[in-house]
Image (cartoon, rainbow, N blue to C red):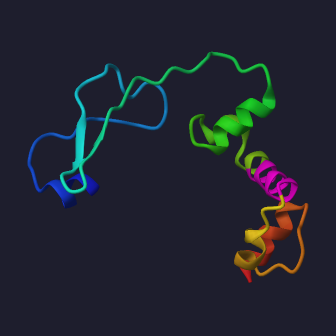
């Protein structure tokens, strides 16, 4: 969408994806915008067949570089809440309408439902 908006050019789009296996080879730079000039280079993703440390798997899934369903969406969300609280990044409180930090992800979800 960004390429169409800024480049107004035709041509076939390069197939890319956030998970390993979509990009098979390094092609050319992909022009996103002429002004300011933005170009990207998508490279093949490589994923190890087995991740020893479960926290590494959770962090990879949290950043979108590992399939969520392998770890479990609730586990990932719970880890994210733990990490936000540990780092004292409490911006989620206002967004969720909570008054104080919460350790239970179910409570955060319930606050969003109301």
| Image spot of residue 21 (x, y percent) | 43, 24
Quadrant assignment, res 109: bottom right
| Image spot of residue 79 (x, y percent) | 80, 48
Eyeballing the image, is 51 above or below 81? above
- The residue shown at (57%, 42%) is 64
Quadrant assignment, res 51: top right
- The residue shown at (15%, 54%) is 7
Eyeballing the image, is 13 above or below 41? below
- The residue shown at (84%, 64%) is 106
In which quadrant of the rendered image does the C terminus lie? bottom right
- Magenta stretch holds residue 86: yes
In which quadrant of the rendered image does the N terminus lie? bottom left
Inspect this view and state whether residue 40 appears. yes
Query: Which residues lie in the magenta part?
Result: 77-87
Inspect this view and state whether residue 1 appears. no
Report the side of 27 relative to 74 (left or right): left
């Amino acid at each position: 969408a960004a390429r169409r908006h800024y480049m107004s050019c035709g041509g076939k789009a390069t197939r890319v994806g956030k998970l390993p296996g979509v990009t098979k080879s390094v092609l050319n730079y992909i022009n996103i915008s002429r002004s300011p000039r933005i170009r990207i280079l998508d490279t093949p993703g490589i994923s190890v067949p087995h991740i020893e440390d479960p926290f590494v798997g959770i962090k990879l899934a949290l950043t979108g570089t590992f399939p969520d369903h392998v770890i479990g969406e609730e586990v990932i969300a719970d880890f994210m809440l733990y990490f936000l609280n540990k780092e004292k990044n409490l911006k989620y409180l206002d967004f969720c309408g909570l008054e104080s930090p919460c350790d239970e992800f179910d409570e955060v979800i319930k606050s969003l439902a109301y």
